[in-house]
Each structure stands twice: as C-alpha cells, then as structure tokens.
Amino acid sequence: MTQRIFLKLPMLLIFVLLLGLSAPLGQAAESATDAGAAQGAAAAPAVTEKAPAAPADKAPAAATEEKASRLKVAIDAATKDGKLDHSKPTGFLGIPGAPDPNPILAFGWAIWVGWIFSTVGAFGGVMASVGHISVFGLGEYAASFGKGTPMNKLATDSIRVSNQWLVGCSALISSFKYWTLGRIVLPLGIALGIGSLAGSILTPILSQGKISFRDYVGYFGIFVLGLGCYLLYETTPGARAKKKQAAAAAKAFEEAAKGHVSEGVQTKVKVLSITPSRVRFTFCGVEFSFNTVLPIVGGFIIASVASFLGVGGGFLLVPFLTSISQLPMYLAAGTSAFAVLVGMVTSITTFMTGGTPVYWPLIGIELGGIVLGSWIGPMTAKYLPDVWLKRLFILLAFIVGINYILRGFTPYRLW
C-alpha cells in the first residue's frame, strides 16, 4: 500500500508545478504594465497633492500593486540618479538602454543548459546563471547601477528567478524522461522534495530585495569552487574504493548500455521495501538502502542554499546522492532532477508573488532550448562513463567558481 502511494506522487507533484506556476504569469504581466507606466511617469511633473486613502475593500488589490511595483520603483530611482536614458530602446525587463540578448544565442545556450542538467542532474542553474550574468551581460548591467541601489537588487533577484525557471523546466522534462527509463529512486526523490519545501519558501522571503549583485556572485563562486574541490577528492582512488556499491552498479549499467546484459539483471530501479525509517531498492543487481530522515534534512539545507543562489541545487544534490547515499551517477542525475523540480516550483512561486519580475521575451525563447536539451540529455548520458561525468562536473565547478569569486571580491575576472 505504501509503495503504491509513493508511485502516485509524481503526477500529484507535476499538477502542483502547473498550478503553482500559473499565478506568476499574471504577476509578470502586471509588472510589465507597471514598467511602462514608470517610463511615462519619469517624464511627467511630480504630483504633490496627497492621494485619497483607498477604501477598505480595495486593500487586497493595493497589496498586490505594491508587490508588483518593485520594477517601477527601481526605474524611478535610476531615472532620478541619472542612470537611465528614456530615449534609448528598451531591453531587459522593459528598461530603457538595458541589454537585449540575441534570441539565437539565447536558444543555443539554453540547449546547453538543458543538456548539462539532464545529463549529470546538476549545473543547470549554474550554467543558466553564467548565461544571464556573463554571456548576455545582465550581471554587468546590474552592477552598473551601484551596490545597494533598487535596480541593482531588482536585477539580481530577476536573474536568480530566471535561472530557476530554466532549471525548473529542465527538471520537469528530464524527470519524466528518467522515470520512463527507470532511473529515478522515487522514494529518495520524494524525501528530498519534502525537505526542500521549507527551504524554498523561507530563503526567498528572507533574501528578496536585500542582495546586491557583487555579494550574490561572490558567494555563488565560493559555493561552486568548494564543491569542485570536494568532488575532485571523490575521484581519487581512496575515495572511490569506499563506494563499491555505486561502482558495481555503474559498471553493470555501462555493460548493459553496450548490450552485455546478464540474464536476470534488473536495469531499472526496483523498490524492495519501504518503512518509516529505511527504504531498500536494487539497480543492476546491486542493493542499496537509505535512512528516510537524512534526505529530508539534506533537502532542506540544499534548497535553502539553492534558493539564495538562484539555482536548482543539483550541484549540491548530486554530491549528496553520490557520496552520502552512495548512488552511481546514472541514478543521481534523475533523482536529483526530481528533487529539484519540487524546490523550483516552491521557490519560483515565492519569488514572483513577492514582486520579482521576469523578462518573458528572453525566458520564453530559452524555455524552448531547455525542452530540446533536456530531452536529449538522458538519452546521451548512458554513453558517457560514470567517472567522466564527474570530471565534467568538476571542470565546470573550478572554472565557474574561480571566475565568480574574482568578480565578487576583486577587480579581476577570467572572462
């Protein structure tokens, strides 16, 4: 009975995703309207008369307008400081003079983001962030307004939630694909998802509108570089010798991918038993188990960090799954994607209901690339050896981490 309940939960979570993300679309449209109004207001003389108080029954509408006006307030402040020229064409978030990314480049970069996330179960948010910050120039633009200004903080929050839109879409597609391939440890993904709910709600509420771009990118780099160092250790002979289960399962799966399958070997995850304290399952003839409390606690911590950085959290989930839960990368990728999906639904909804706008002309194009890359990733991952997937992960961690630490805390950078 318990196993049947676990198997029905994916459809429920996908329904929650669609329901939770329907509200932000209306919120974004409202923000865009406010942006246009702000540009007109910038040229108009200030009105000094005190406006009449709103009737009591209009209070909910007033609260919604206040949340949606973050973009208007930021534009007004930047105009007052002389940092906006309203004669220039609009770009990012409908702001005059802001960068307007090339749609072909945006689509191509999104394919890469979708592929890397769906292949290794991580680094989608990191690569989405690299695209928005560096490739499209949004980070430089946010920093140009000065630390602590409303536009700097607004653009930083928008980059954070835009990253999560891409990762959330990739997580939805790749989770479905991995599920059909039988390479998701569903009970483990659900336990991680339960823990991520609180972290994904709490962190956006506490940090929204308070993080400047330089602080964001610097801490982002520290987390990523630290992770790369840890994973480098994990590839050493001594560390790999401690993971006999994962190595045996990875080797069996690689043989299966080549068509060398022994009779009776199960190449899909098979849950053996579920109790309140422990879950047992097999993959490629190797038995695994995990304590149910540990992933719930881990999910909360990982989701809190991920929401602060504006990423999916796969770059922390994958090490958690491969190191603590002893899973091979072939299972870590799909299980991570499923857990990320739950956190993204919650974090995106919290950010956008708090008034953080999204630039839909860019995100809409990127989502198309995400769909393509995320569908290809799970089908190509089986042709890459387990150790090489980890090495790709580490290489990206070092390059991105070093560059963003330099950008956040020094006047230097790699690019």
Image: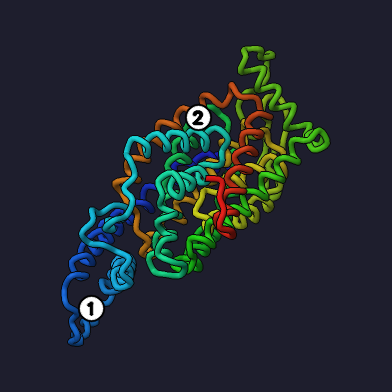
Badge 2 amino acid: Gly
Instruction: Tell me residue 79's x, y (percent).
Output: 29, 69
Q: Earlier in the sequence, mark 2 or mark 1?
A: 1
If the image is split into quadrants, where does the N terminus sit? top right
Q: Nearer the viewer, residue 79 or 323?
A: 79
Residue at 32 percent of width and 55 percent of height: 98
Q: Which residue is mark 1?
A: 57
Instruction: Tell me residue 368's x, y (percent).
Output: 35, 36
Residue at 52 percent of width and 61 percent of height: 214
Does dot 2 land on a helix, a strand or a loop? Answer: helix
Residue 69 visible, this orientation: no
Q: Alpha carbon of mark 2 to alpha carbon of mark 1: how far?
A: 51 Å
Kindly indicate the quadrant of the structure image that contains residue 238.
top right
Indicate left or right for 267 with 58 as reference: right
Q: Residue furthest front?
A: 411
Q: Rate crowding at label 1 as few (under 14), some (14 to 19) or many (20 or more) other CA atoms within 10 Å.
A: few
Q: Which residue is mark 2?
A: 377
Indicate left or right for 268 with 84 as reference: right
Instruction: Tell me residue 90's x, y (percent).
Output: 25, 54
Q: Rate crowding at label 2 as few (under 14), some (14 to 19) or many (20 or more) other CA atoms within 10 Å.
A: many
Does dot 1 land on a helix, a strand or a loop? Answer: helix
Q: Select label 2 or label 1 by which is in front.
A: 2
Residue at 53 percent of width and 24 percent of height: 380
311 relative to 144, above or below: above
Instruction: Tell me residue 116's x, y (percent).
Output: 52, 35
Q: Nearer the viewer, residue 310 or 296?
A: 310
Badge 1 amino acid: Asp
Residue 102 visible, this orientation: yes
Tally of numbered tags? 2
C-beta proximity under 8 Å, tags 2 and 1: no
